[in-house]
Every structure is written in structure tokens, then in C-alpha cells.
Image (cartoon, grey):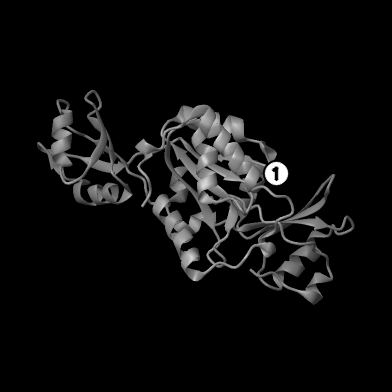
Amino acid sequence: MAAASSIQPPSVHSSLARESALSPEMDSPENRQPEDEEAAAAAAAAAQQSSEPGISLRELPDLEPEEIERRLAKTRQELSNRRKILIKNLPPDTTNQEVHEILKEYELKYCFVDRNKGTAFVTLLNGDQAQDAIRSLHHSTVRGRLINVTLQPTDSLLCLTNLPHTFTAQQFEELVRTYGNIERSFLVYSELTGHSKGYGFVEYMKKDSASRARSELLGRPLGDRSLMVQWMDVNQLSQEENLHSKSLCVDRLPLDLCDSEELTQLFSETYRPVFCQVRFCLCGSHIFYIQDQKIYICVLEIMAH
């Protein structure tokens, strides 16, 4: 389930149908130490610098192709950088030294063996090493026992939405690293423009750090925005295409524009939406344009918090 984008397009009215159409090497986490008050001050400064009100995607400068690819490559690198593996069905007397010997082709950063469960929790240098270890060792034998080698599950992954589109990857990391050691963090960029889509992901080394971050960042003002923070299932980020939202939020609509069917027909000139809903609030009406029914649940869930 991809997170909802915080894109803020210009005003939309039914006359729009005649005038226009919708267009459609990472640092080691061990070196990413939180610095309490100093880090908090840096995060606040980053938020202050990047949250100028009134900045829309249309006003952002065009990026060079090289810069677009650099940003996309950084996101791909961080997305795939799951370096923690789980080795199951080890002999009950397996030692740390034996696990190091099994993984002698790789650089171990952490290793803990639970002898009662015959399980080893291992952190390798990077995601490439983890994937190679899984390919090489999964269903191999250790002293006659068939072992299972998989990526470790994580319950410390958060999605932050409604970020300013001018927010940089460095500013995003400064914002989230205040709350604990980071395993990985990245923004999601448009593949066409290279600009941030207004949301990003952070995985902490500890669940407590993620819980604290969610508690303190949820609803936090960031310029003229309020941050939204959501727990994420790491399995839903297994592929790059899952990063990109399939929903659009269109705001600044006239109050008399309230026919969902008319809006559906308008959007259908480009792509037929699965779902289209108008929501009213004190600031005006909003369209929710959904191409994936599953995302609709996500959008409402995010906005409800």
C-alpha cells in the first residue's frame, strides 16, 4: 500500500474540461547517532527553512536529467538496503563463532544466537550482502539440518506524509533522526520531474524509537502543513512501484462543485478513476481521485488520525 501524496494542484472547476487536462553510498546506520537537543535543533531549522507557504509543484524549477536520476537512484538504494537476516533451524548448540563461519563471505555488524529457538539474528554490511546471503544459504545444511535464511521482519517502519515538496533528503533525515538510530530513510520522488512527492519513509533500529517519532511528529506543524505519520508493513515496500501513490487530492474547489459523477467524467478524459469522492471541510471542498480501491482505505485512514 503506497502512501498518499500531498500534491497541491491549482483550482479545479467543471470548465476545466474545456481548458486543460490532468498531466498525469548510504552512511552506515552505526554512524547515525541521535544528538538529542542538537539534533532536535537541526531538525527544527530544516523544517523552518523548507516550509515556505504557497510553494506548489508548478513553481519548482526543472531539474537536470542527471539530478533526477541521482535522486531516484538514492531512493532505490535505500529501499533495497534491508541488511538484517534471520537464520532458522540451526542446531541447538550453535555458537556465534559458528554463525560467523557460516557467513564468512560477508561483513557482520551484529550477531545474536537464540539457542533455545535455533535462530540467529544477523545484521550485515548492506542490503546487497543480505540478498546474496539469502540466495546462497537459504535451504543449505548445517550439520545435517536444513536452515532457512530470510530477511528479518520489522515493526519500526513509518511513512511521513504532507511534507513540503522543497524538503530535501538531508532535511528529512535531520527531522527523523532526532528520535533514535536510523536503519534507513528516504523520500519518494516523481520519476518525471525528480521533485519530492511530499512523503517519505523511515525505519528505526528500535520499535521504541519509531513509536516516539510517530507520537511526536503526528500532527506537527511544518510551515502551513501538518505532518501525518503512519505505521507501514515492510512487505508492502518490497518493490519500487509500490512506493508511488495511486491517489490524488485536489483542493481549492468552488463550494458549488459537489457532483461526484461530474468529477468522475472530468477525470475520465485522461484515466478512468476507480473511485471519486467530494469531501467538504471549513476551507472548501476536496476531490479524492482514486485509481486503486485499496488506496482509498489508506487515504481515509491517514486523514482520520
Q: Is residue 214 above or below residue 280?
A: above
Kindly identify the residue that appears in the image at 83 percent across and 65 percent down.
13
Q: Label 1's element?
A: loop
Q: Answer left or right for 161 relative to 232.
A: right
The percent position of residue 211, horizontal first and vertical second, equals: 52, 30
Q: Residue furthest top?
A: 116
* Near-viewer residue (68 or 153): 68
Kindly identify the residue that appears in the image at 16 percent across and 45 percent down.
140
* Near-viewer residue (225 or 148): 225
Q: Is residue 272 above or below residue 128?
A: below
The percent position of residue 259, horizontal first and vertical second, equals: 83, 60
* Near-viewer residue (277 or 78): 78
Quarter of the picture containing the C terminus is top right
Kindly identify the residue that appears in the image at 57 percent across and 38 percent down.
43
Q: Is residue 115 above or below residue 139?
A: above
The amino acid beneath tag 1 is Gly
Q: Which residue is tagged 1?
A: 223
